[in-house]
Image (cartoon, grey):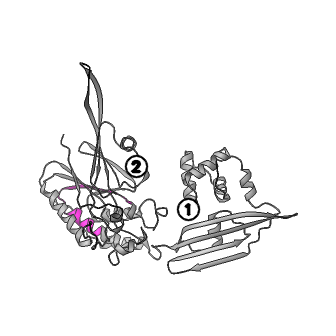
Amino acid sequence: MNLPKNEVAWDLAENTDKLPGESGREFSRRLSELSGGAFSPAAFRRILSRLGKKKRGESAYARKAKPKKGRISDPGGKVVRDERQNDMVWSYDGSANITNLAEALAFSKVDLDVWEVDRHVFNTWTTTTADTQKWNVQVKVWFKRRADHGIDWVAAIDEVSSTMKRRSPKAHHGSGTGVICTADFHLGAYIDDLIRSDAFNIGVLVDYLSSTADIINSKGYSEVHAIMLGDFIESFTGLNHQNSWKGLGKGMFGMNAVILCSEILSEFLAKINNLKAVYLVSGNHDRVTSDKDGDQKGEVGTMLHYLLSKSLTVEVKYHHMIITEVIDGIAYVMTHGHLPFSKKDPSKILFDYGKQGVYNVLLQGHTHARQTKKTTRSRQMTWNDRIVVHTDEVDYRVLTAPPMFTGNFFSESLGYSSSAGFLEIQNNG
């Protein structure tokens, strides 16, 4: 089995301690994250397996790669720093004692509050003479300017929340419990020239949400639960995809998009009569970095949770990945649908996150398509030499919520398009 021909991965595996209770797979995933995605979890599993310990001893390869007594480790060398407005490349060619990315960043003295690592390459080798061994290193790091550079998040959010109106949903006489599920709002997107996707902008989104509130209020529920399945904004950085910025309204990125989104959603939720609670999960568009590795939790969801909790008088629950809540005798399992665990068989997801003994509904968004999956359990009975299949029990249902956002060039080029909509669910007994 071929192992990565780069001692950086070996050094990282050797010098990183496992956490208490951490499994081998979890440890490998964490090592991959620490490497900035340069090496996959599978690569680290192979390294750890070859070391035969999960943290014992030291491999011959790692011993050979590290600087030893008698080796020349000259901090000199050639440093090149090419800085532009939004990106920078830093490289080093010499014999400084640099063995991993963290040490390279420390050596570079690059301000990581301003720049974030996009990718890097790393090569080391030794040259041996009769008396000494010389340590050689070549490293090149590409940086992107942080989208949030210069923003005082605490001050910005405090300023917004201090001026927010405190909104209380109206109480009306009604009966029954209703669950409303919305997804994929993509606030900030501006679409006007596609063939299969309807025009979309902030005004269109506000109209969709207002119509949704009117429809729910017409049903006369005594209690309403609002579920929102992420992708609240189109892009925080303007660079979720290569040309995302082309489909954004003017100024509709960064904190501007988050603040406006909180105001629009707060106003929408306050219009719903007898609103009991709100549930939020993050989507893949809710990250505050250009690539998914920089923000895997979708921190826009965290900001919206804080702002909506300040502006609404009802309970607002949030988790970046998944929420399970029993409402009117049904266990609702809520997730956006973009994370790897969402690709598992639904029964496995519900075994891990659902509630046993009650009917489960798995709610997802992400695909911008209406889908319903109903699973049945059957038993076979033989009667007069005929096999008859009887439906024994319906265990759960999987629903993919339609989007509020109808699509952009990226989604239409992949063959996806949809009309806007929402799900309304109630327990029919």
The residue shown at (37%, 73%) is 253
Quick one: 267 or 242, which is closer to the camera?
242
Picture coordinates of residue 298, whole percent (x, y): 41, 61
* Residue under pointer 1: 36
Per the image, the residue denoted by label 2 is 343
What's the magenta region? 262-283
Number of callouts in the render? Answer: 2
From the top left corner, tell me how far across and down residue 336 is, in percent. 35, 55
First in sequence: mark 1 vs mark 2 = 1
Q: In terms of depth relative to the viewer, which is nearer, 17 or 237?
A: 237
The Cα–Cα distance between marks 1 and 2, rounded to whole angstroms, is 24 Å
Residue 40 lies in the magenta-colored region: no
Residue at x 78%, y 60% (from the top left corner): 68
Q: Nearer the viewer, mark 1 or mark 2?
A: 2
Q: Horizontal placement of 72 versus 101: left or right?
A: right
Q: Residue at x 32, y 68 (%)?
A: 408
Q: Quadrant of residue 396?
A: top left
Q: Quadrant of the C terminus?
A: top left
